Amino acid sequence: MRRANQTETAVLGVLSVQPMTGYAVREAIRDVLGHFWSESFGQIYPMLATLERQGYATRQGSTKPGSSVFAITRAGQGRLTELLRQPIQDAPPRNGLMLRLYFGRHLGPAECRSLIHDARLEAEQRIAELTAVRRAIESGAGHGADRPYWLLTVAAGEQAARATLAWADGAIAALEQLDPAPGSGAAAAPGATAGSGERAGGSGGTAAG
Amino acid sequence: MRRANQTETAVLGVLSVQPMTGYAVREAIRDVLGHFWSESFGQIYPMLATLERQGYATRQGSTKPGSSVFAITRAGQGRLTELLRQPIQDAPPRNGLMLRLYFGRHLGPAECRSLIHDARLEAEQRIAELTAVRRAIESGAGHGADRPYWLLTVAAGEQAARATLAWADGAIAALEQLDPAPGSGAAAAPGATAGSGERAGGSGGTAAG
DNA sequence: CCGGTCATGTAATCGGTTACATGATTCG
DNA sequence: CGAATCATGTAACCGATTACATGACCGG
């Protein structure tokens, strides 16, 4: 089963917006697609060479020496559409936070809460960034037919981040119900000195229903 | 910068729940952690050998010949906690759907709607699966202290899937406003025969606000 | 002139999937 | 008995990251 060359799609895609150097391609992917895609130099430069060789992009060694601007060709546009139509190859899931929470018993409620709190902060920051990006797209008059599609992806990111926020709140609340150290309020329950955690079941864990 | 051995974490983690064969480790990861983690045989068997060599797991070649059951050791439990405390290494984002939608101009509204529709179906199915898993965890009396943590991760998956549903609905609606082929209702607007798509701006793209 | 940014590439390495080879057990 | 499942491992390959080497250009 051949693995898809999604790098080709990404590079041709950003070149379809406007011609640019390899360096700028990477910046465009990091800054604009950054919330849902990533490529490194080690992938981009060889790919640009390949695209040139196959006639999907042309290199214009101009402006400054030691710098070449790549532009997508007519054939490259056809190739891009073809690539976009290929079945989606989603990478196998690898969520480090969930891996840790699933085995959170070995960390205990307090450390898990800390992990979730960090994730919440990250989600908040992502929302701020995406909102800024959306504002820029909405007000900026430059990008023409691309606009509605870009707004679609931004909306997806915002929705996902908001979902993370909601989940985190519920999860932290559930964990606070589980151990006696929320920082304030009711102290440790009377009697229990150092329970092994056997009674962790019950109604606990109704997080973010 | 050393890349983290999160495979070790995952394998030790499932062994911490109960001893099992390598084959069962993979099944556990696929069926239970499957929504947010994955490992293949090619990773699991070498890792089990390493864990045995390092004293984090023991092999009990018993019950049936040609089959060995691995159990986590005391040292392995310490190692697991250590691994869980290491900073989260999240894989660089690679969302194939978003990559396609971002360059959706080259596909057109209809094909994009189809992609989103597929994603919506997937999300629905994931919700169904996760709900079943949650029911099993809630009713099953077996798993003791692990339960609240497992419910946490399941809740995260459900929340994310619901967010996808909401986004997909908004996105499809936005795209239908963009082109004249929703299948029913108002046909193509009068006058425009084959617009180049220049007027795709305006109020379009208020998806899933 | 020196540090930061822009710019281009290559080599080493690694994490991970896929495919292959092999065999026992169980169930219809 | 034959197919499906359980079970263990190895080898090849590949996509991707990281690090390295190099150099132009610009502003303070």
Image (cartoon, coloured by chain):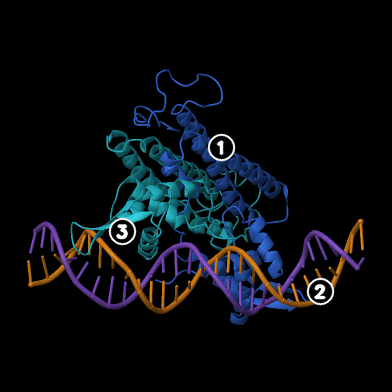
Chain colours: A blue, B cyan, C purple, D orange
Identity of the amino acid at label 3? Gly
Q: Chain of mark 1?
A: A
How many residues crowd mark 1 within 10 Å: few (<14), some (14–19), many (20+)? some
The residue tagged 3 is B22
Amino acid identity at mark 1: His
Of badges 1 and 3, the one in the foreground is 3
> What kind of element bears circle 3?
helix
Mark 2 belongs to which subunit?
Answer: A
* Mark 2 residue element: loop
Screen quadrant of the C terminus of chain A: top left
Mark 2 packing: few (<14 Cα in 10 Å), some, or many (20+)? few
| Dot 2 amino acid type | Thr
- Chain that bears disc 3: B
Q: Which mark is residue A117?
A: 1
Between the residue at mark 1 and the residue at mark 3, the CA separation in whole angstroms equals 34 Å
The answer to the question of whether label 2 and label 3 lie on touching residues, with beta carbons closer than 8 A, is: no
Circle 2 residue: A63
* CB contact under 8 Å: marks 1 and 3: no
Residue A90 visible in the snapshot: yes
Q: CA distance from mark 2 to mark 3?
A: 59 Å
- Across and down, in percent, residue C24 comes to 16, 66
